[in-house]
Image (tube, rainbow, N blue to C red):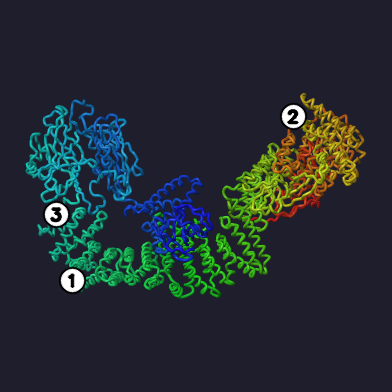
Amino acid sequence: MWIPTDHEKYGVVLVSFRGTVQHGLPLEIGDTVQILEKCEGWYRGYILKNPNVKGIFPSSYIHLKNAHVKNKGQFETVIPVEDSVITEMTSTLRDWGAMWKQLYVKNEGDLFHRLWHVMNEILDLRRQVLVGHLTHDRMRDVKQHITARLDWGNEQLGLDLVPRQEFSMVDPDEISVTELYKLMEHRHRKKDTPAVASTHHLFVHVKSLVSANLGEELEVFIHIYDGRENRPLSERFFVKLNKSGLPKSPEKTERQCTLFVDLGSSDLRKDVYIVVHVVRIGRMGAGEKKNLCSVPYRRPFGCAVVSIADLLTADSKDDHLLKVYACNTESEWHQIHENIIKKANSRYNLSGSNTGLAVALQLLHGDIEQLRREYMVLFTRGVSITRKLGFSDVIMPGEMRNDLYITLEKGEFEKGGKSVARNVEITVYVLDIDGQILKTHVAAGSGEPGGDEYHSLVLYHNNSPRWAEQLKLPIPVDMFRGSHVRFEFRHCSTKDKGEKKLFGYSFVPLMQEDGRTLPDGTHELIIYKCEENASLAECSRYLKLPFSKGNLPSNNQTLKGAKESFWITSFLCSTKLTQNGDMLDLLKWRAHPERINDSLSKLKEIDGSEIVKFLQDTLDTLFGILDESSQRYGLKVFDSLVHIINLLQDSKFQHFKPVMDTYIESHFAGALSYRDLIKVLKWYVDRIVDAEIQDHIQQVLKASEYIFKYIIQSRRLFSLATGGQNEEEFRVCIHELFMSIRFFLSQDNKSTSPVAQTQAVFLRTFPAVYGELLKIFAVREVAGFVRETLGSLPTAVHADCLEAVKLQCIAKTVESQLYINPESRCILLPVVLRVLQAHMQEQRDLVMCARIFTSMLSLIKKQENGTAEPVVSEEVELIVESLLGVLLRTILEISNRPQQSGPAMRLQFQDVTGEFVACLLALLRQMSDRHYQQLLQAFSGKDNLRDFLLQIFTVFRILIRPEMFSKDWTVMRLVTNNVIITTVLYLSDALRKNFLNDKFDYKVWDSYFYLSVIFINQPCLQLESFSPSKRKKILEKYGDMRVMMGCEIFSMWQNLGEHKLNFIPAMIGPFLEVTLVPQPDLRNVMIPIFHDMMDWEQRRSGNFKQVEAKLIDKLDSLMSEGKGDETYRELFNSILLKKIERETWRESGISLIATVTRLMERLLDYRDCMKLGEVDGKKIGCTVSLLNFYKTELNKEEMYIRYIHKLYDLHFKAQNYTEASYTLLLYDELLEWSDRPLREFLNYPMQSEWQRKEYLHLTIVQNFDRGKCWENGIILCRELADQYESYYDYRNLSKMRMMEASLYDKIMDQQRLEPEFFRVGFYGKKFPFFLRNKEFVCRGHDYERLEAFQQRMLNEFPHAIAMQHVNQPDQTIYQADAQYLQIYAVTPIPESQDVLQRDGVPDNIKSFYKFNHILRFRYDRPFHKGTKDKENEFKSLWVERTTLTLVQSLPGISRWFEVDKRELVEVSPLENAIEVIENKNLQLRTLITQCQSRQMQNINPLTMCLNGVIDAAVNGGLARYQEAFFAKDYILNHPEDGEKIGRLRELMFEQAHILEYGLAVHEKFVPQDMRPLHKKLVDQFHLMKSSLGIQEFPAYVRASPVHFTNGSPRTCRNSVPNIISPDGGRGVARRSLPSYPAVNRYSSSSLSSQASNEVSNITGQSESSDEVFNMQPSPSTSSLSSNHSASPNVTSSAPSSARGSPQMAEKHKHSRENACLSPRDRPVSAIFPNPMDPAQRAPPHQIGDATLPRSDPNLSAPDKVRHTPSSWSLDSVKEGAPSFSDSFGKTLCPPVPPRPLYSAGSSAKNMRSQSPVSASRSPQKTMVPPFTPSPTECQSTSLVSNSPVLSGSYSSGISSLSRCSVSEASGTELPAGDHSSFPLPQPTTLPNSVSSSSDEPIRRENKTPPPYSVYERNNPRRPVPLPHSLSIPPQADPPALPPKPHQLRTGSMKLDGTSDPRVPRPRPLPRKVSQL
């Protein structure tokens, strides 16, 4: 049975548990679990990090821990009972763990590794804490270390700052907000600005001396030297080195390492140096022989210097190699370091080239105890301490020191009978009172232990040596009296075995008879001569002699005049001994009572360090004198006491205050002193007002704290001794004293008066007295003293300084022990509040005001302890009444105040703002319902309440600002928000009661709503962005405050009633921002408000256009900031649709909701696509979708223009220059050529509309140029040129014309690639909305083929699945939760047929029209209908032809556009066969033409094509068609196909004729090695003819000079077949009657000569107008007319590489386009025409194809030229055909001007005419100059040709007959006529009509607007008169000509004043002139 647990509540998993049992809960080792129930060895509970999943687990797997249970029962929470630091460590490490892994993923290796080390370190420290074996101090250090590491990690990872007290996390609910702020600020400061240490220490480690010429032992002395004052700052550190230059005692580190301690900040200067002296011990001369002298001497070696400032930058113990210098002369040794510092190079040099001293130097900061903790290893290993000379900056009490430093300065010696100067050595001894040498009391420096004696340096042959050697004599205090130092002088001979001969001595006693020590300074000692055998053992003999020349009596001239002297400098550093006689006189006052007055007077002149040494003795002396002679010396003793007290205020001696405190508590015994002290103090206070000089009085008042301490302690001692006698007398004295104080404080004086300054001095010290008064008086009594004293100050104080001091006094009062007591607080609070209010109202001393306020509120919180005591409640009431209003005003004032310039001022400003904010929050948190009621009732009128609400709402908005608190102060922000929402809930009632209905106030309500909105949108409340643990903590503590505020907004909104209209549309944006917060509850509450807004707006206006406009405007900006998601879109849609179900305006509401929802779809897609790392294609597609939506559905011009520029930037970045141009054209179209000023917008400056349009034009032209779309650029160049011309700006006009000319050159000279087009279907729900379940046609990149495109798409959509068939998917695919891509190549259907059919237009112009402005694309899929005949598959081979119409033509503003319409037709097997043969015939003609015009590099393509056709025909190719379609069964079963069968027969005969001619051409050009193949082809051709039953070609074939016919039976039933012969002439057949009834009919007039059965048809255009057989006709040739039909089905569906390259093998062509299809579904790669498609039927006047030539139907028979067979020969072809190569296969753009006029003498290629003319027959072979239309001839209304789409695609997969490159063929070529036959009519103009209205394709209503292209402009151009030479006969009816760039635009001026009704008018664009 499961039993709820009582104690087993919390545990840690020891072993992982898989949870395989029923209801088992899987556990991982280390998880923490909360236990709910237990049963027989099992627990039931949950893991704390996932409380929703509960289960059972074995109890043995759990380690139980003590825990505290809150809310016991169903909703209980468990808090482990453990050290809070441990708890924090555990939770923090868990949070870090997840983030640490992310660092690895983000490749932040450095932080990853550092954090890993810190985490391991924390885990180790955690173990130490858990074990619990640490000492108290060590535990403290470990915890401090842990918290430092935790803070470091949190800062690095951007986590929150944790407020702590004593290393433990603080619960913000358990302390006041002001205290919380202080903690946060303290930690923040600590983090930002580490405290600057005032004490520094230098660590030195001597390692070795490197030198080439060692061999002697060395002594190294290091000290710190002040270069400014030229004196040493420290004693010396002494290290002995052996002969190798290494330390002598390597095992004793204290002898190599030292710490120069107690360096002040002033010592870290550039002119403070570390000076090293090196002394060698050995022979006198460095180069002497070893046997000369065995006695070692201390001799100078070298010196090194380094500035201490160089070490400030070094953080670690860097090794330094110091250069060692030697002096040039030994007499300079004493100042070598000064010379090195001064860089006096002439006085020293390097002691050796490689000599250097290796030392480690490191500066350490902090007091010595701190260093002991931080550098434990250093101190445990051993380090000697090297002290400063003298006391440190701060003298600590209890510090024992007694060091005498003596420096051997210099000596003056006589020669002593020697010829050379002496080598003098000094030996120093210290002797005690008995004359015994003190052992170990002579030290050369720290590091080495002291010795019995010291030997100085020996300077060679120098009678005036200067040593400058410092000794340290650490003599105990008790041995000082009677001790002396003796200096013995010896001459060190370099001969006589180097003995040292004594020749004199000096001495100096250490203490004088009166107890004073040897004074500091330089002493000139007397040298007494003596011999070695003279006994110095009896000291008493010479101690009676004078030791110094300064002490000699004036009559002793003998010793004064002695030449020999010795100088030393002494310096005593002692805490017990004094050199001051006045101090000794005072301490021994009883011995000389007569000197008391004098001694007390001299006390002020004694140095402070001497007084503090003897502080207790001095104080005993003073109070002893006071007790014995108070009348006589009372005033002087009081003054002396004041002097000593004030001395301790000095920073140097401030640490002696505790010594005085201890003295007062423990040693002071003056029980009667209080009377005298009170009396003298009152005497001084009473004289303040009258005294002229206040300095001394101010000194007295400055010491009043300690004076009161002495008074109170004295009174307590007296009471103890007497049992409390004279109590009343004492109270009276104190009251009188305070009366005197109040009187002098009440004086109103100017700030400059001495009394005001004295008042300020008293106020500074007064709060320190409270604590002393409390020792005797009751709390309320002391509070009364304080209140009356502070209350006595004048209210209108003139002195600013006094005001500040008064405030400081109040601050100290509030912080004092007195104020903490609630009894005294209620007495003092009114005084404090009065002063505080006055200052805050005047905005003075705000920092101090904030400090006072903070202290007051901290105390209130402390006293509360969770329950509101009556006293506390009253205090809050008082504070609210006095300060709440002024506090709000203060915060507003300082927040709006401009920031000061200095960083310190800014910091102070920020601090005071933060502190006032904390005060406000603390106060509001203390306020209860009663307080709010009283506050609101206290306002006298509605206006005051209104002002208060506006103020508090504004302040709350300031508090919410991100800059209010640091980024990582989340704890503080949450507390702030909790207080704000609580207060707002209280105040909203006041808002409802006072400002609704007739009292409605818009401003207050608006302020309320604005505050609520920004409250909800704060980053610190967006819980979704937090870690799960942090989110859980916040929800447990505060709940989701956003939802609470949202409910409050909704409630308040509902109360507004009709006043809601005041907030529509203003609040739509803010409320929308709230609903975008990803919190479901908040959204459910807030979204219905929009329904309410729509309803009220509908009532007011009858619509809700305002709501719609505002929603749309705000949605874009908010969603681009990353707000909103798919869930929101669905919720918005569903909630509002549900809400409006019963509304009368339901329909318009649904429309609005649908519009907004669709906008959200696009905005969400746009945001997702714009993420970093997304491919450009997605970004562009999404932007296009959004841009079109803004234009078409929303008509938001500004947003539309913004997205135009975003799209432009994307295209430009992706180098889609053509698309970028089209995009920018959208904006250009919105502008006019006007001078209207435009405002600054995006990156455009303020300028006129004309200037902006000019700039746009130039930018677009530049991009068209980059994108090789030069035809489009030409149009814009012309438009700009017109503008320049109209303004007579000829300079720019010239530039523009040159630019236009350069574009023409590029069209003709530069290569352009033909793009591929691909159809892409995006199926499945996982695609973005703008792609989902839609199909697009995409323009591929350069050189991009199907495989590459497919791979690119799969890379862009890595989760997509490529579909392997081309069938339309079913609904399961559409609705699938996946992504499916269906990709295949499609063929463009060009619209510009007039250009493509025109003769003489070069290929590189034509190819532009084939691949630009394409609206329709086609794809063919072959299939078998019915039963498939295995013997002949052609019988059942049908073609499914799909035509795709786009919403916009390509290229445009995107590389892909959506398919608007699909048309599906089926092509029958017969029609398919006709197309295949037509296409093959055209391919053959093309290759023959190219071969004859020498455009081929080799003949292989023609050979392969001939071989393919003939071989297929012989082996059954054409025979299969005969078998399939000429069989009687088929003819009988399909009577409707009679014409088509006839057409197929014609084409088969035509093919045979072409082959015959092709073989003739092939024979002429075939190389020798391929002759056998040619012979084989000829033989097979004869077989083919016989298999077809052709013995001789029919008459109609022979008579009809076929021009590359390619018509289908449907569109070309009037055409006459042609026959060709390799040696035939060229004829032009007359058009037959339209009613041509049967296949075999032909015009009899065209059969006048059998000669016309020759190759005239082969001379039709192919590939380009220049690729023609230009044969010279015979004069006798008859004029024939023929009509040729052109099939619309010409353009290949294969990739352009295949289309443009006939040489490519058929199998390769086929495989590329079928790459993404399965074998079963693969098409034969042919695109077949649909004979039934009426849309593709050519109009009567435009029969033909873009690729086929046609005869002019308008020429009469006499005007035609007849050709004779004899006029043709292959030779003549060869002569007449110029050889040149046309480049093609490039992508081009709009219209091209016609070719220029050719002269009569131009080459044969110029013979073709550009338009129909009347030509007379001529016997000469003359050229007819082609006609060039007038420059003023008008073009059609659109630059895109309006002729119907007639081109198609063909198959390459059926047989070798199936491929021909026909898409490049051009139009009709006319025979040449006599030049003189051209008529010269009068000038006339052309009609504007160029094509009939039937040419206009039917434009369907698009989903998106058509591209704003250069073709749809309507700017008129000036008409230009037509020249005589170019005029056209009126009777001529010209065919449709290609549009020319220089022609007029739509709407251009009609020269005849009328417009042709046949000219279609373009659809008018929705045009709005931009205001931007």
Left or right of 1627 in this view: 674: left
Q: Which mark is in front, 2 or 1?
A: 1
Q: Nearer the viewer, mark 3 or mark 1?
A: 1
Q: Which image quarter: residue 783?
A: bottom left
Residue at 83% of width from left, 44% of height from top? 1743
Q: Earlier in the sequence, mark 3 or mark 1?
A: 3
Q: SS class of the residue under badge 2?
A: loop
Q: Distance between the residues labelled 3 and 2?
A: 129 Å
Specify few, some or many for label 3: CA neighbours under 10 Å numbering under 14, 14-19, or 20 or more.
some
> Do residues under tags 2 and 1 come within 8 Å of each other at their CB atoms?
no
Q: Are there few (<14), some (14-19), or many (20+) residues within 10 Å of tag 2? A: few
Residue beneath disc 1 = 723
Which element carries disc 1, helix, strand or loop?
loop
Quarter of the figure with the C terminus: bottom right
The correct choice, above or below, for 658 with respect to 672 in the image is above
Residue 744 % position (x, y): 26, 69
Q: Which mark is residue 1032?
A: none
Q: Name the residue under label 3.
A: 584
Residue 675 location (% of width, % of height): 18, 68
- 736, above or below 1173, in the image: below
Dividing the picture into quarters, in which one does residue 1879 lie? Answer: top right
Q: Which amino acid does label 1 sit on?
A: Gly
